[in-house]
């Protein structure tokens, strides 16, 4: 489930369990495929793994382990949970701070519970589960850890950062042999903390503008294959802890990059090559659904090229390359149109961190690999947008066709999501006659452009070159890659306002709708999620966070 400022605020009442990354990105294949288009970085599974485990409705039959982490990666030798500079370790032991007041569970992801954690959804009704996801209870075999990392924030080295309000409570290996790390967010002080907490209240700068106020505390339990990020390696390079850096690199490669030969002297180079490719793929995927991460610092960029620590984030509504969801980003560094460039910047910082463990020849090759990032990105971007337009095969004019459409969208401020979705639903005959039904409001906005008919002519000619295709097949193919629903800021705000009255019905509705963003859903249509945004939505500040 994705989060937004509204959802983050809502969590002051609740505990939530979710999978890292936006649910829309998960749905279209951030970890597998974009509806038939392969995406690499497959999980490190043993295909012969026997399904010994079955879903359970009791935590007494379920366990976590921290052994795979702490047996290999050193832990802080200072036991005190005090804010300080930390050295010569990857983790510090830090226990979550339990709530004093009563905790409510508002929503869980059934897909995560049953598909990843082997837990029957009925487990959410137990007190043990509530204690687990709120940080009130440590599962047998778990040693809660806070990760030490650094990072470049808004282009400048920020030094030690780390999990300031998060606890990695253990690793779970499920019935498919998949390894998942469980992390609590908002669960109390660690040696890397920078927030002030008081009992169940926290101080929060809601819009990152210096206006700090007290809100009720909350915890979210989220899962990911790994929480290591570029900053995990940067802090070690900056501190000169090169032996520890090699240890961490070898651990990450061994656990998550099975195609890299651990006995090869070029393994760090091969690792870097894969991170470059997968980062290009990931950002192209973001762009294909209008997703702006918001804070693309190196401490928020995963080494596995998955979407983590996003926010303040947002899904672009009217097409605007300058869209910035983070109100604190005054210089628009992380605007949606600059995400590919920021990816290049972050990968260059990863290369700088790796240089101490590369020889002269490997450094030269790594630089060449980095230079290939732009080509990888634009190739993947074009591939995804061809699919969004229903184009089969390749044509040298496809880039022009895509760029032409995006320019029309920018000029008319057409809604990005619905313009592509409505192109997926309109017939070729209607387009040919420039007969845009009233229900296709985003296309009607687009059609106001004086060059819209020129674009339609080029588009229809290109569709005519789809060998063996039909209009119905084209529309079916396009609706499978162009979402009808995304988490818009006004939708989250509407859920927040109801939640203030202890009405969580819209939270549940959003959760259900966003699990199936490509399917037309009666409840979503009734709520107006595919209609033109309400007039009051224009006055909302966009400040979303994971």
Image (cartoon, rainbow, N blue to C red):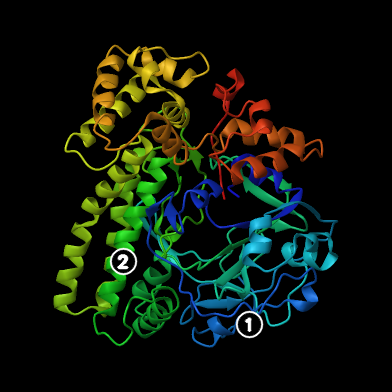
Neighbours of disc 2 within 10 Å: few (<14), some (14-19), many (20+) = many
- 56 vs 164, left or right, is right
The answer to whether one can see residue 164 in this image is no
Identity of the residue drawn at 46% across and 21% down: 442
- 357 vs 527, left or right, is left
The answer to whether one can see residue 365 in this image is yes
The dot on residue 224 is none
Name the foreground residue: 140 vs 428: 428
Determine whether 141 is above or below 105 in the image: below
x then y, percent, for residue 316? 46, 34
Identity of the residue drawn at 26% across and 27% down: 404
Q: Closer to us: mark 2 or mark 1?
A: 2
The kind of secondary structure element at disc 1 is: loop
- 429 vs 193, left or right, is left
- 394 vs 327, left or right, is left
Name the foreground residue: 351 vs 303: 303
- The tally of labels here is 2
Name the foreground residue: 471 vs 182: 471
The dot on residue 79 is 1
x then y, percent, for residue 473? 41, 35
Quarter where residue 220 is shown: bottom right
x then y, percent, for residue 329? 43, 40
Quarter where residue 395 is shown: top left
The dot on residue 274 is 2
x then y, percent, for residue 288? 39, 41
Identity of the residue drawn at 63% across and 80% down: 65
The mark nearer the N terminus, 2 or 1, is 1
Neighbours of disc 1 within 10 Å: few (<14), some (14-19), many (20+) = few
Quarter where residue 94 is shown: bottom right
Identity of the residue drawn at 29% across and 11% down: 450
């Amino acid at each position: 489930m994705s989060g937004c400022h509204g959802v983050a605020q809502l969590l002051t009442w609740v505990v939530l369990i979710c999978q890292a990354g936006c649910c829309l990105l998960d749905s279209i294949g951030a970890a597998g495929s974009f509806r038939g288009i392969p995406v690499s970085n497959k999980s490190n599974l043993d295909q012969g793994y026997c399904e010994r485990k079955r879903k359970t409705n009791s935590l007494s039959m379920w366990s976590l382990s921290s052994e795979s982490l702490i047996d290999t990666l050193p832990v802080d030798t200072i036991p005190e949970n005090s804010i300080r500079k930390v050295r010569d370790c990857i983790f510090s032991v830090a226990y979550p701070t339990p709530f004093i007041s009563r905790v409510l569970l508002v929503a869980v992801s059934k897909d995560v519970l049953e598909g990843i954690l082997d837990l029957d959804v009925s487990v959410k009704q137990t007190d043990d589960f509530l204690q687990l996801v709120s940080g009130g209870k440590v599962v047998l075999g778990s040693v809660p850890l806070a990760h030490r990392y650094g990072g470049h924030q808004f282009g400048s080295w920020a030094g030690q950062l780390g999990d300031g309000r998060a606890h990695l409570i253990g690793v779970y290996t499920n019935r498919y042999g998949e390894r998942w790390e469980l992390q609590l967010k908002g669960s109390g002080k660690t040696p890397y903390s920078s927030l002030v907490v008081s009992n169940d209240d926290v101080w929060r700068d809601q819009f990152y503008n210096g206006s700090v106020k007290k809100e009720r505390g909350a915890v979210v339990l989220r899962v990911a294959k790994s929480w290591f990020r570029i900053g995990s390696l940067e802090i070690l390079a900056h501190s000169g802890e090169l032996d520890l850096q090699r240890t961490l690199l070898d651990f990450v490669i061994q656990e998550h990059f099975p195609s890299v030969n651990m006995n090869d002297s070029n393994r760090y180079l091969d690792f870097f090559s894969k991170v470059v490719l997968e980062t290009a793929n990931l950002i192209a995927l973001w762009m294909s659904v209008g997703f702006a991460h918001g804070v693309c610092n190196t401490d928020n960029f995963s080494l596995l090229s998955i979407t983590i620590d996003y926010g303040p984030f947002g899904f672009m509504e009217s097409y605007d390359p300058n869209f910035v969801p983070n109100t604190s980003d005054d210089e628009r560094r992380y605007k949606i149109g600059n995400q590919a460039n920021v990816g290049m910047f972050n990968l260059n910082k990863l290369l700088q961190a790796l240089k101490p463990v590369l020889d002269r020849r490997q450094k030269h090759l790594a630089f060449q690999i980095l230079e290939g990032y732009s080509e990888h990105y634009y190739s993947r971007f074009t591939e995804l947008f061809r699919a969004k337009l229903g184009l089969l095969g390749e044509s040298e004019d496809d880039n022009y066709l895509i760029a032409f459409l995006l320019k029309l969208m920018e000029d008319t401020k057409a809604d990005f999501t619905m313009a592509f979705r409505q192109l997926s639903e309109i017939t070729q005959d209607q387009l040919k006659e420039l007969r845009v039904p009233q229900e296709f409001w985003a296309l009607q906005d687009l059609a106001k452009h004086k060059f819209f008919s020129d674009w339609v002519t080029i588009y229809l000619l290109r569709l005519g070159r789809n060998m063996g295709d039909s209009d119905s097949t084209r529309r079916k193919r396009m609706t499978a890659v162009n979402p009808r629903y995304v988490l818009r800021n006004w939708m989250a705000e509407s859920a927040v306002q109801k939640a203030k009255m202890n009405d969580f019905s819209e939270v549940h509705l959003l959760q259900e709708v966003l699990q199936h963003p490509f399917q037309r859903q009666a409840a979503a249509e009734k709520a107006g999620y595919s209609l033109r945004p309400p007039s009051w939505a224009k006055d909302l500040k966009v400040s979303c966070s994971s």
